[in-house]
Image (cartoon, rainbow, N blue to C red):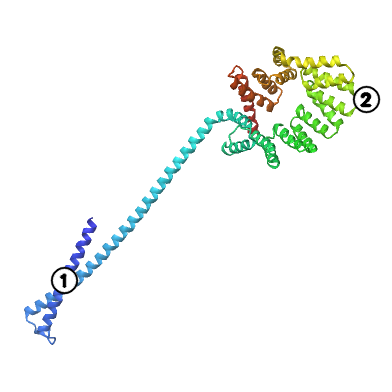
């Protein structure tokens, strides 16, 4: 405001002096016109000389004053320009400061948002892991395989990368759904991805090997199963699958050898004896009936109420005209179907076996109960625990989730603790697997 006042004052003063200068010049011109040009200073009267001197000095003063004012005005304009320049710079700095402050504020909000999301993820991890396998089971129970694929895909896209979750299971489940839709290329891709994600367990090798079995590429399935044996050479299920593939190829000697290896690690593997009986019947070697009967008797001793073994034993007896014995065998396997208390006795015996650590015998009893009472929650609980104790993680998880579903439908929750314990322990194991990869 002060600078503006000074600038205006100087401008009007300059105009005022210019007006006076004009009057002085006009007076000088009039004087010369009156006096004429042919004069000498000595000829002037004192009054004319004083008048001329006053006019000339006034003109000189006014010229220098105007020039001085002009210079001052220029300086003031320069100062104003500098002020505007400095003001612009300050405005620019202030604008940049505001921009920096806005960016800093945005960055701070982003950091807070990320922190909140991270905290939410941390808080949700335990619940997420707890619900992980529940989600897979729910999707697997969806009857529409196309819908299953959509839900598994959505699950993979939206679940992120939660520490402690073995996503190989998701790819295996989606691969199985693709397989049911005859999308073989997609199924194979998912099974191979599962094998890459989980290199510590044999589970992906079961899925990948089964894929090649469905394609009747038994040599490739054997190759895959043998890769799984490198992780666990004593896995009797892998050995059984290799034997089954050799059997499907007609290489009975190799199949028989692998059944024997499986029995070495699990002497109570009833299905190994049953399959050896089938091989013996196929080969029709010397004394094949006697050998076949011996294997069937082993199987029935372990699983007394397994339909197929009893029916095949009865068929052999009928071939030798031992019809009364055949009828007795069939009666023994039919009766429990109509006597629930008999099945409960088998369940209780299985529980006793489990509690003293005889897991193979316990598992055989639980499987027998499963044949006749597939919805028995207590039996499903014991199946889950027994499979987990024997290291059959996939089966343990399957029966735990099936059992929880049955318990919910029957509104019976006395076995929930056992089911949840198995699920939580498997969850902890998968957490360790992912961390060590």
Please say if 49 is above or below 14: below
Q: In this view, does 311 lie to the left or right of 345?
A: right
How far, Cα to Cα, is label 2 from label 1?
146 Å
Would residue 235 be seen by someone viewing this image from the given angle?
A: no
Question: Which of the numbered marks, if any, corresponds to residue 286?
Answer: 2
Q: In this view, does 113 lie to the left or right of 403?
A: left
Residue 321 picture quarter = top right
Query: Residue 41: image x %, image y %?
Result: 12, 83
Mark 2 Cα shell of 10 Å, populated few (<14), some (14-19), many (≥20) = few
Please say if 180 is above or below 325: below
Identify the element where label 1 is drawn.
helix
Would residue 109 be seen by someone viewing this image from the given angle?
A: yes
Question: Which residue is at a point 80% across and 26% down the rendered structure image?
Answer: 262
Q: In which quarter of the image is the C terminus?
A: top right
Question: Which of the numbered marks, if any, corresponds to residue 19?
Answer: 1
Question: Which residue is at a point 20% across and 71% down the rendered structure image?
Answer: 64
Of the residues under marks 2 and 1, which one precedes in the sequence? Answer: 1
Q: In this view, does 326 lie to the left or right of 191?
A: right
Query: Residue 286: image x %, image y %?
Result: 93, 25
Residue 305 picture quarter = top right
Please say if 9 is above or below 204: below
Residue 66 picture quarter = bottom left
Mark 1 Cα shell of 10 Å, populated few (<14), some (14-19), many (≥20) = few
Question: Which residue is at a point 79% across and 32% down the rendered structure image?
Answer: 242
């Amino acid at each position: 405001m002060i600078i503006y006042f000074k600038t205006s004052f100087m401008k009007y003063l300059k105009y005022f002096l210019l007006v006076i200068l004009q009057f002085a010049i006009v007076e000088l011109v009039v004087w010369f016109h009156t006096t004429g040009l042919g004069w000498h200073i000595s000829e002037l009267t004192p009054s004319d000389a004083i008048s001329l001197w006053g006019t000339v000095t006034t003109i000189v003063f006014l010229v220098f004053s105007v020039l001085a004012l002009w210079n001052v005005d220029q300086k003031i304009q320069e100062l104003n320009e500098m002020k505007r320049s400095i003001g612009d710079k300050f405005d620019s700095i202030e604008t940049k400061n505001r921009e920096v402050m806005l960016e800093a504020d945005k960055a701070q909000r982003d950091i807070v948002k990320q922190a909140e999301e991270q905290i939410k993820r941390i808080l949700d991890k335990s619940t997420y892991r707890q619900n992980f396998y529940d989600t897979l089971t729910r999707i697997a129970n969806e009857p529409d395989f196309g819908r299953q694929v959509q839900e598994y895909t959505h699950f993979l896209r939206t679940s992120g990368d939660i520490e402690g979750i073995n996503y190989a299971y998701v790819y295996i489940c989606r691969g199985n759904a693709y397989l049911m839709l005859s999308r073989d290329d997609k199924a194979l891709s998912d099974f191979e991805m599962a094998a890459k994600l989980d290199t510590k367990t044999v589970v992906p090798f079961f899925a990948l090997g089964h894929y090649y079995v469905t394609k009747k590429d038994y040599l490739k399935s054997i190759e895959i199963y043998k890769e799984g044996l490198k992780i666990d050479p004593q896995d009797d299920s892998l050995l059984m699958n290799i034997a089954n593939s050799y059997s499907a190829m007609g290489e009975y000697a190799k199949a028989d050898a692998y059944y024997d290896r499986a029995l070495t690690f699990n002497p109570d593997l009833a299905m190994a004896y049953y399959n050896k009986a089938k091989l013996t019947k196929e080969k029709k070697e010397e004394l094949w009936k006697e050998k076949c009967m011996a294997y069937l008797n082993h199987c029935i001793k372990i699983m007394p109420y397994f339909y197929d073994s009893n029916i095949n034993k009865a068929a052999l007896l009928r071939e030798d005209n031992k019809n009364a014995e055949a009828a007795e065998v069939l009666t023994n396997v039919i009766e429990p179907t109509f006597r629930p208390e008999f099945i409960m006795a088998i369940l209780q015996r299985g529980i006793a076996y489990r509690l003293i650590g005889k897991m193979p015998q316990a598992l055989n009893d639980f499987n027998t109960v499963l044949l006749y009472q597939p919805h028995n929650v207590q039996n499903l609980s014991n199946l889950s625990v027994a499979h987990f104790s024997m290291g059959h993680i996939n089966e343990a998880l399957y029966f735990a989730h099936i059992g929880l579903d049955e318990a919910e439908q029957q509104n019976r929750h006395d076995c929930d603790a056992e089911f949840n314990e198995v699920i939580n322990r498997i969850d902890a194991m998968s957490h360790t697997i992912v961390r060590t990869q």
